[in-house]
């Protein structure tokens, strides 16, 4: 199967997703988060660095759950063109951005 190249918008959205997950992870180790989400640390690393710009939905759902992120908030953040990224989670209503 031939994979079509990603559009610039998909690449940018993947970078925003990675930044959001990195910020939400905070001081937690990549290994701890990956194991809790039942994904490999390498997969999480690739998503966080933007190397995997379009990860599978169940993967993102599992990571978001471990990080306490609402999927609605994740989508709102990554689909906002040119917008900054800030984690949302417990104590932060969906769509509310934290100061960067």
Image (cartoon, rainbow, N blue to C red):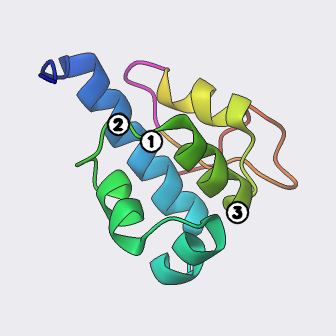
**Nearest to the observer: residue 44 or residue 77:** 44
Q: Is residue 49 magenta?
A: no
Horizontal and vertical percent position of residue 99: 60, 49
Instruction: Indicate whether 72 appears above or below 8.
Output: below
Query: Looking at the rendered structure, which numbered label has been put on residue 49?
Result: none
Q: Is residue 90 left or right of residue 27?
A: right
Q: Which residue is mark 2?
A: 14
Query: In terms of image quadrants, where is residue 72?
Result: top right
Residue ID at (15%, 18%): 4
Quadrant of the snapshot with the N terminus: top left
In the structure shown, which secondary structural element does the residue marked by tag 3 occupy? helix
In the structure shown, which secondary structural element does the residue marked by tag 2 occupy? helix
| Magenta stretch, residue numbers | 80-84
Q: CA distance from mark 3 to mark 2?
A: 19 Å
Q: CA distance from mark 1 to mark 2?
A: 5 Å
Query: Looking at the rendered structure, which numbered label has been put on residue 17?
Result: 1
Q: Which residue is mark 3?
A: 66
Q: Residues within 10 Å of mark 2 (few under 14, many from 20)?
A: many
Are circles 1 and 2 on residues that touch, CB within 8 Å? yes
């Amino acid at each position: 199967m031939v994979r079509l190249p990603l559009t610039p918008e998909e690449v940018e959205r993947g970078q925003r997703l990675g930044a959001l997950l990195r910020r939400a992870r905070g001081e937690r180790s990549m290994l701890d988060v990956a194991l809790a989400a039942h994904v490999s640390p390498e997969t999480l690393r690739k998503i966080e660095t933007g190397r995997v710009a379009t990860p599978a939905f169940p993967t993102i759902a599992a990571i978001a759950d471990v990080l306490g992120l609402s999927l609605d908030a994740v989508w709102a953040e990554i689909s906002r063109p040119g917008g900054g990224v800030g984690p949302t989670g417990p104590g932060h209503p969906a769509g509310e951005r934290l100061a960067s």
